[in-house]
Image (cartoon, helix red, strand yellow):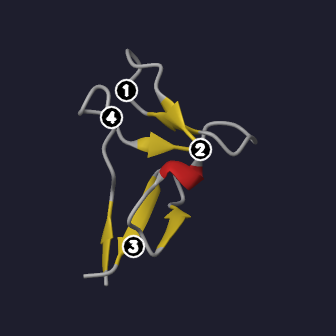
Amino acid sequence: MTWLIPHCGRCDTGRFAQRDRTARLHCTNPHCDHWIHPRELVDIHEWALCDDGTVIVRIVE
């Protein structure tokens, strides 16, 4: 299994991070207002937050 850092599908430069206490994951690009819910991460085995709040996902190969 491999851990990856998913990129934003709207701007392609930002990554996702949890910025507040909600379940939403926000793009880290300050010029992009895209956010998703964790359930929208597809084809992954699990996801986790790094110490800085950035999302990483584990995929099954």
| Residue ranking furthest to the right | 21
Distance Cα–Cα, label 2 vs label 4: 16 Å
Residue 36: percent from left, percent from top:
53, 38
Q: Quadrant of residue 24?
A: top right
Residue type marked 4: Gly
Residue 40: percent from left, percent from top:
51, 49
Task: Answer whether labels 1 and 4 touch (C-beta < 8 Å).
Answer: yes
**Left or right of residue 28, residue 2 in this image:** left
Secondary element at tag 3: strand
Q: What label does residue 29 carry, if any? A: 1
**Residue 2, placed above or below residue 37:** below
Distance Cα–Cα, label 1 vs label 3: 22 Å
Q: Tell me if mark 4 has few (under 14), some (14-19) or many (20+) residues whose alpha carbon lies within 10 angstroms of its own.
A: some
User: What residue appears at the point 25 percent right and 33 percent down from the top-left corner?
Assistant: 13
| Marker count (numbered) | 4
User: What residue appears at the point 75 percent right and 42 percent down from the top-left corner?
Assistant: 21
Residue type marked 3: Arg
Q: Earlier in the sequence, mark 3 or mark 2?
A: 2
User: What residue appears at the point 42 percent right and 33 percent down from the top-left corner?
Assistant: 28
Depth check, front residue: 6 or 51: 6
Q: Nearer the viewer, mark 3 or mark 4?
A: 3
Distance Cα–Cα, label 2 vs label 1: 17 Å
User: For mark 4, what is the residue?
Assistant: 14
Q: What label does residue 37 carry, if any? A: 2
Distance Cα–Cα, label 3 vs label 4: 18 Å
**Left or right of residue 28, residue 11 in this image:** left
Distance Cα–Cα, label 3 vs label 2: 17 Å
The reply to whether residue 59 is in sight is yes
